[in-house]
Amino acid sequence: MSDQLTFQNPVDRFPDITPPEQDQPEPGLDAELIPNTDRGEDSYRGTGRLEGRRALITGSDSGIGAAVAIAFAREGADVALSYLPEEEEDAQYVARLIEDAGRTALCLPGDLSDPEFCRDVVRQAADGLGGLDALVNNAGRQIAVKDIADLTDEQWEHTFATNIHAMFRVVKAALEFLPAGSTIVNSTSVQAYSPSAHLIDYASTKAAINNFTKGMATQLAPRGVRVNGVAPGPIWTPLQVSDGQPKEALPHFGKNTPLGRAGQPTELAPAYVFLTSTESSYVLGETLNVNGGQPTP
């Protein structure tokens, strides 16, 4: 497979997948996904853009977070991986790839819906890496519910606790360690602009993340800490099969984009690398849309 720097047609750079109907218990594993995702294991080529950086990446065991972790390591960063204990198998696979790149991988399992863990994971990352100068808030929870009458208070609160409350707490804790020149990149979504009817709670949190990102970018700019976001479109990850999408919708996932296919996690990684690198030193409060051409504001 050619790498991300090779001239290619985006329509067929990756296969137009037709996933079978399948189910995994939440949170889902890349190791059991059909077909497997491409996280850049065999294709991402680093160029030293993050040499010596020390990054905490939440939700980094699988999908987009895993692709970002692999790319960061190959760009020269040491990486602390935050993930749920149930995702240990995927996390260990990513950790091995980071170590194969000659960088440090620090595994930090725990649940970000727990306020105390949000604070602990930041301290553990800074201690284990010898400091912290990059934060990627990527962990997220997405459960499809077709009718608001069936959307329980418990699910609404759990989704907000994982997707936006945890982000607030992790950022607040990280500011104790982030020096001038540090970066924060938050994962939002095309759902923030064009919410699907079956993802009301998830989409609402992603809109909140957009606003949080812009507000924090303004607040932290004088400190020399840049805050930006990335808004993925339909990306093939374990999130989709662990009740993130209706099962009958899986074979059609991503086919309504202008490119006609779902994205792969590795296609997100360069956006996070750019926003974390010094190349984007004059970029603050921006949301980069990586969504296969879906119109957004």
Image (cartoon, grey):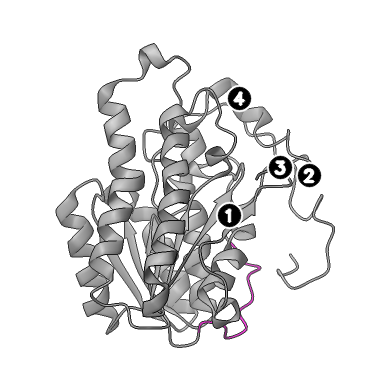
Residue at the image point whose x is 39% and y is 51% from the top: 139
Tag 1 residue: 265
Residues under numbered marks 2 and 3 in contact, where contact means CB atoms less than 8 Å apart: no
Which of the marked residues, 4 or 2, is nearer the chain's N terminus? 4
Q: Is residue 56 left or right of residue 17?
A: left
Determine which of the numbered discs, if any, sits on residue 249 in the image.
4
Mark 1 or mark 3, earlier in chain: 1
Q: What range of the chain is rendered magenta?
A: 40-50
- Give the spatial CA distance, label 4 vs label 2: 18 Å
Q: 102 or 265: which is nearer to us?
A: 265
Query: Badge 2: how crowded within 10 Å, few (<14), some, or many (20+)?
Result: some
In the rendered structure, which amino acid carries the disc numbered 4?
Ala
Among the two numbered marks 3 and 4 on one chain, the one whose residue lies closer to the N terminus: 4
Residue 289 in the image, given as x and y percentages of width and height? 63, 53
1 vs 2, front mark: 2
Q: CA distance from mark 1 to mark 2?
A: 16 Å
